[in-house]
Image: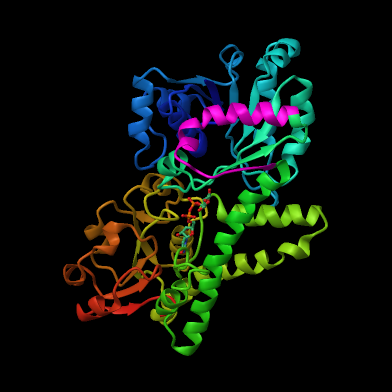
Amino acid sequence: MKISVIGCGYLGAVHAAAMAQLGHEVIGVDVDASRIEALAAGQAPFFEPGFPEILRAALDSGKLRFALAPASEELADVDVHFIAVGTPQSEDGKAANLTYVNSAVDMVLKALPSSDTAAEAGRPVIVGKSTVPVGTASALAPRIEAAGATLLWNPEFLREGFAVADTLHPDRLVYGLPQDAERAKTGAAALERVYAPLLAEGIPLIKTSYPTAELVKVAANSFLATKISFINAMAELCEATGGDVTELATAIGYDERIGNKFLKAGIGFGGGCLPKDIRAFQARAEELGVESAVSFLRDVDAINQRRRDRVVAQAIKIFDRKIENAKITVLGAAFKPNSDDIRDSPALEVALRLADAGAQVTITDPEALPGVATRYPQLITEADVLTALTGSDLVLLLTEWAEFVNIDPVQATELVGTARIIDGRNALDPCIWQGAGWSYAGLGR
Ligand code: UDX
């Protein structure tokens, strides 16, 4: 099939390469000329394990091309257009900004052949993948249908660091379909052809309405955020009582109804999705007059924020408030390991707050340093972990990259000024670190 992917950010670029890998003829379109140039040259504009390989293979096979928006001619005879543009948080810090979704749809509609021809051929199908406030698809559909096309909503659940696997082997596929039965049938049939190899593997398919499909995405992210904040709330209780949240999580996780995943207590969640999505969900619920239904998400957000406050307070307390010029090493800048993404990164926020408090903060990260060095001159960036540790008065492990978790505490003791560590991800074995002479503090243990 001929496929376009509008928006070649994280989601779109991976989706485009993955669809080419499934055998489709794919064109990736973006408004950013340097991004298009890099992708067309086989260079990944972000760090994602496995992505450069599938990108280059797709380019070599001739199945994948990139073009600068509006690319009208290239879009004219496409069967399925995927909308994969961002929906960033608006300036008010709440609702999702739909500017890019609207302009992507406009661009596709302008490139369509005359509506008669399109309707006869039963195509094209426009498929929304971006995370949007519930109601967006219903609002977009009339314009799309008037132009002879059909809209489907097909949310994406990929995690950074696992984006390729999550796209090619998702847990489930969700199709939000139009109410009109004929349109729904044509649209679903087109998407089934796109995903035929995945469906052949037996990946569950849920066919539903637009609002349910949109809600599935925000509900899933809200549930995940709630799970993390729940265990972090238990960490607060453990801190008040001398309990150990890691043991508590293991114990409750054995109950299959609870499950052991997403129960890692620490400095909490960040990134480009969970924090933004739970805020946008609250803003949308307020517009719909049902804000009380998701008011608990305010607490989820507040608990998450408190974990960052807690680590900053712990560090300041260690220096008995004399933190000025204290040499602090922060291990990790990305919001999680195997990513170079620093959007709403808990690690970076803690590092910046300690620098604001007057400490001399050296930050290290295997992939995220370039973004930090250009934007935050108040932090010292150091690519080599051992150099970053040298002379340090306090080490904070804030992103649990394997490189950091595997640091040899005996070797590290010899480098630092004072062997003191705050393990903001509860990723280290306290006995081993204490055995090597370190003063160890976790979160909630
Ligand atoms: C998330 C969803 O998982 C994904 O399905 C959705 O499509 C996009 O948003 P992502 O933002 O890539 O994916 O990261 P995720 O792996 O979910 O981690 C989010 C944050 O939660 C990270 O900062 C991570 O460190 C933190 N986290 C995760 C915890 O603090 N504890 C945990 O137990 C799990």
Q: Name which quarter of the figure residue 327 lies in.
A: bottom left
Q: Image check: 185 left or right of 5? A: right
Q: With respect to residue 216, does 329 lie above or below?
A: below
Q: Residue at x 59, y 11 (%)?
A: 73
Q: Residue at x 71, y 42 (%)?
A: 209
Foreground residue among 169 and 299: 169
Can see residue 59? Answer: yes
Q: State the predominant SS element of the stretch in magenta.
A: helix
Q: Image check: 394 left or right of 211? A: left
Count the labels in the image. Answer: 0
Quadrant location, the C terminus? bottom left
Q: Is residue 191 magenta?
A: yes
| Residue 116 placement (x, y as % from top left) | 75, 11
Q: Residue at x 29, y 58 (%)?
A: 402
Q: With respect to residue 8, does 95 lie above or below?
A: below
Q: Image check: 444 left or right of 421? A: right
Considering every residue shown, the one lying at the far bottom of the view is 241
Considering every residue shown, the one lying at the far right of the view is 289
Q: Residue at x 40, y 67 (%)?
A: 425
Q: With respect to residue 210, does 42 lie above or below?
A: above
Can see residue 93? Answer: no
Magenta residues (range): 182-208
Type of colouring: rainbow
| Residue 395 placement (x, y as % from top left) | 32, 69
| Residue 29 placement (x, y as % from top left) | 54, 24
Q: Is residue 99 magenta?
A: no
Foreground residue among 267 and 171: 171
